[in-house]
Image: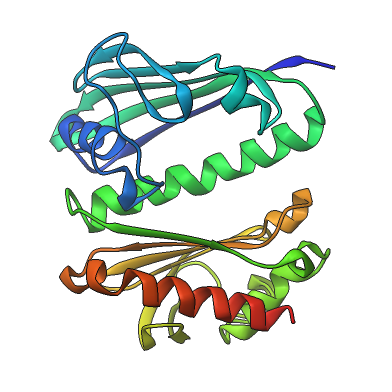
Amino acid sequence: MAKEFEIVREFEVDAPPERIWDAITANTAGWLWPTEYEPREGGAAGFGSTVATWDPPHRLVVRSESPEELKAVGQSLNQLDHLIEPREGGRSWVRYVHSGIFVENWDDQYDGANKHTDFYLHTLRQYVTHFPGMPAVHTDVQGPAASTAKDAFETVGRALGLGASAADGASEGDRVRVDLPGAGEVDAVVDFRNENFLGLRTGDAMYRFFGRNAWGAPVGVALHRFAASASGDEDATRKAWQSWLDGLYA
């Protein structure tokens, strides 16, 4: 049965409004995925959506009622509303509202979207703090069908040498040395970790691991790489990570 939902987050971040605006409208590959906006009200945006409000650097509202795009994700309406206000000391206050209508599996859909929101917005804050304004090469891969198993995400932590969970391995704030496909051994900070998500930040990249098996989908990995050399080895990097995931669940 179709049912409305609303996910609201408010936070302060040590970055001016202009930097937040740039991140959510131009450099989305640095923390989410590549998205383009036609910079005007009524302009086109990604996934068949439309810019409802374009007021830089204070407010961006994007709305989609596209049956073709939304059917695949079980929705009939989707809206993202970003409100950005300046604070003292060059900081910003951000209010993010994701709303719409889920048309099936409401509880699972809401739970997944709600928990993904915290990870995505955390990654946004990491981006504007550690890699402000830097263009990124975004790479997204997902595991095979076997990675939908109940305990599949624990396999990722063990494979990285971080333990199956924060309770028996590395936790947020820990500095670690990990062997990453296509990059070799690197020093990293565990910037996020819970039962569904893991974030690693190095000097020139962020690696995001998604335990989407909790919602019946494959485990996924997203890379946000900022080194100048990243654009030249994108295909090789994608293949290395895909091979790594396929090997974990063979």
Colouring method of the image: rainbow
Q: Is residue 118 above or below residue 3?
A: below
Q: Is residue 245 above or below residue 198?
A: below
Residue 6 position, x and y percent, is 61, 20
Residue 148 position, x and y percent, is 78, 61
Residue 192 visible to the viewer? no
The answer to whether 194 appears left or right of 118 in the picture is right
Residue 205 position, x and y percent, is 31, 67
Query: Where does the N terminus fall, quadrant-wise?
Result: top right
Q: Is residue 164 above or below residue 101?
A: below
Residue nearest the observer in this picture, 177 or 105: 105
Q: Residue at x 14, y 36 (%)?
A: 89
Q: Residue at x 74, y 57 (%)?
A: 213
Question: Residue 161, located in which quarter of the rendered image?
Answer: bottom right
Question: Residue 236, located in which quarter of the rendered image?
Answer: bottom left
Question: Residue 169, located in which quarter of the rendered image?
Answer: bottom right
Residue 17 visible to the viewer? yes
The answer to whether 16 appears left or right of 211 in the picture is left
The answer to whether 247 appears left or right of 25 in the picture is right
Residue 141 position, x and y percent, is 53, 63
Q: Residue at x 41, y 51 (%)?
A: 123
Residue nearest the observer in this picture, 58 or 101: 101
Query: Where does the C terminus fall, quadrant-wise?
Result: bottom right
Residue nearest the observer in this picture, 62 or 82: 62
Q: How many marks?
A: 0
